[in-house]
Image: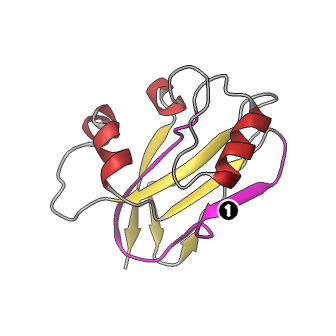
């Protein structure tokens, strides 16, 4: 569970208690003018995932240690953020981690819909 609000400089951490699914925190800072609620933003996640650079990406293997793929999890700038898991449901953990190590963007691996489509997303506000 994530808090609704944290102070600037907070470092988030991804943990994974799932026995067989890989998870991640992909964190985007929303534009200050974006007044949409979190459900609207996630409904248009394709635009979010292709149009902006994440502030941080933390990958967590089942029962494993956090792997910082982008940044270290620090939310330095005040504002609204969306955090979601874009890993395909049922993706092979080894295949995904191997693809992540060699790709320039989100790994393209087999699996079902991304976890955020099953409710794995949240909004967090960083205060100044």
Q: Is residue 62 visible?
A: yes
Image coords of residue 97 (percent x, y):
73, 44
Image coords of residue 62 (percent x, y):
80, 38
> Residue 107 occupies which quadrant of the picture?
top right
Residue toward you, 49 or 73: 49
Badge 1 local density, few (<14 within 10 Å), some, or many (20+)? some
Q: Who's the residue at 57% across and 29% down the image?
A: 88
Q: Who's the residue at 18% across and 55% down the image?
A: 34
* Quadrant of the frame with the C terminus: bottom left
* Quadrant of the frame with the N terminus: top right
Q: Is residue 1 visible?
A: no
Task: Find the magenta span and give its range.
Answer: 63-87
Question: On screen, 91 above or below 34?
Answer: above
Q: Who's the residue at 53% across and 63% down the image?
A: 56
Disc 1: which residue:
68
* Image position of 53 (left or right of 111): left
Image coords of residue 76 (percent x, y):
46, 77
| Magenta-drawn stretch contains 14 | no
């Amino acid at each position: 569970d994530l808090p609704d609000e944290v102070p600037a400089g907070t470092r988030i951490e991804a943990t994974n208690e799932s026995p067989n699914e890989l998870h991640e925190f992909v964190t985007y800072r929303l534009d200050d003018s974006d007044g949409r609620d979190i459900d609207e933003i996630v409904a248009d996640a394709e635009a979010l995932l292709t149009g902006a650079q994440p502030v941080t990406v933390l990958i967590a293997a089942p029962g494993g240690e956090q792997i910082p793929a982008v940044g270290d999890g620090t939310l330095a700038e005040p504002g609204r953020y969306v955090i979601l898991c874009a890993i395909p449901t049922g993706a092979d953990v080894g295949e995904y981690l191997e693809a992540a190590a060699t790709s320039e963007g989100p790994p393209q691996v087999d699996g079902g819909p991304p976890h955020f489509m099953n409710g794995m997303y949240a909004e967090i506000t960083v205060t100044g």
